Image (cartoon, rainbow, N blue to C red):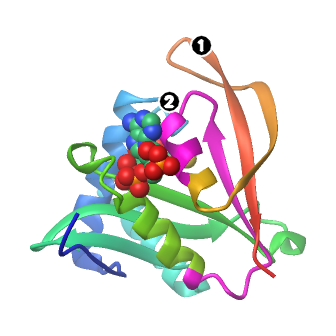
Amino acid sequence: MKNVIIRPAEEKDLQAINDILNYAIVHTNYNLNEHTRSFEEAQQWYAEHIAEGYPVIVAEKDGTVLGWASLSWFRRFSGYRTTAEVSVYVSHQYRHKGIGTMLVTELERMARKYHMLIAVITDNNTASLSLHSRCGFIPMCTFRELAYKNGEYVSVTFMTKKLN
Ligand SMILES: CC(C)(COP(=O)(O)OP(=O)(O)OC[C@H]1O[C@@H](n2cnc3c(N)ncnc32)[C@H](O)[C@@H]1OP(=O)(O)O)[C@@H](O)C(=O)NCCC(=O)NCCS
């Protein structure tokens, strides 16, 4: 897709970022939250990322946010500080056009201080498994029936990429 800009997210992007996330929460079990995120919770999430130096980026075309991605703490124990968890979401109208790949590639460029990136992916999320494989992540293990959403147990695959 042409003329897509990848840039750091700003406060003004939060509504679009949250709408894209909430669409996935409502329509899939790829995100294992069962309740949508309020705008106030999104503001808190964004503020925590900025304060702790974790990047949040967006893909924008002609002023419209098409997708976003972030790095976040992987568990809150200090010994995990060398690992960051990848999140990537693309608006459903714009999927399969290379935007997810652009976002993950840019996140990785911004992730040099980490030793390991991890993606936690539900086992039925073919697109995310493909995207992360394509970006060099390796499936390390699948936890069978680790979560529960929409009336069924969900298996979850951990994929990692060692950076240095
Ligand atoms: C996962 C997601 C971010 C991928 O974004 P995208 O912009 O569609 O990804 P890309 O176009 O860059 O494609 C990346 C790879 O995924 C594959 N892919 C994308 N959509 C796919 C689909 N619907 N089915 C199968 N493969 C798919 C592509 O073929 C490509 O791999 P390939 O070129 O080696 O074939 C997007 O589908 C999404 O937002 N899904 C909902 C939220 C989500 O699941 N986030 C991840 C949580 S772990």
Secondary structure state at the residue bearing disc 1 = strand
Whole-percent x, y for residue 161 in the image? 74, 64
Q: Does the magenta portion include 126? A: yes
Residue at 50% x, 17% y: name it: 150
Among the 4 quarters of the image, the one containing residue 151: top right
**Location of residue 112 with respect to 14 vertically, above or below:** below
The relative height of residue 147 versus residue 93 in the rendered view (above or below) is above
Residue ID at (75%, 58%): 160
Residue behind mark 1 = 152
Say which element carries label 2: loop
Q: Residue at x 23, y 73 (%)?
A: 4
Please state which of residues 148 and 71 is positioned toward the viewer in this rendering: 71
Report how many numbered discs are placed on residues in the image. 2
Q: Is residue 95 left or right of residue 137?
A: left
Which residue shows up at 58% across the image and 70% down it? 71
Name the quadrant of the C terminus: bottom right
- Mark drawn on residue 29: 2
- Give neighbour class at mark 1: few <14, some 14-19, many 20+ (Cα, 10 Å): few
For the residues labelled 1 and 2, the Cα–Cα distance comes to: 10 Å
Ligand 1 is within 8 Å of the C-beta of the residue at disc 2: no
Residue toward you, 71 or 110:
110
Q: Is residue 144 left or right of residue 39?
A: right
Residue at the outermost top position? 151
**First to last magenta residue range:** 109-131
Mark 1 or mark 2: which comes first in sequence? 2
- Looking at numbered disc 2 in the image, what kind of residue is underneath it? Asn
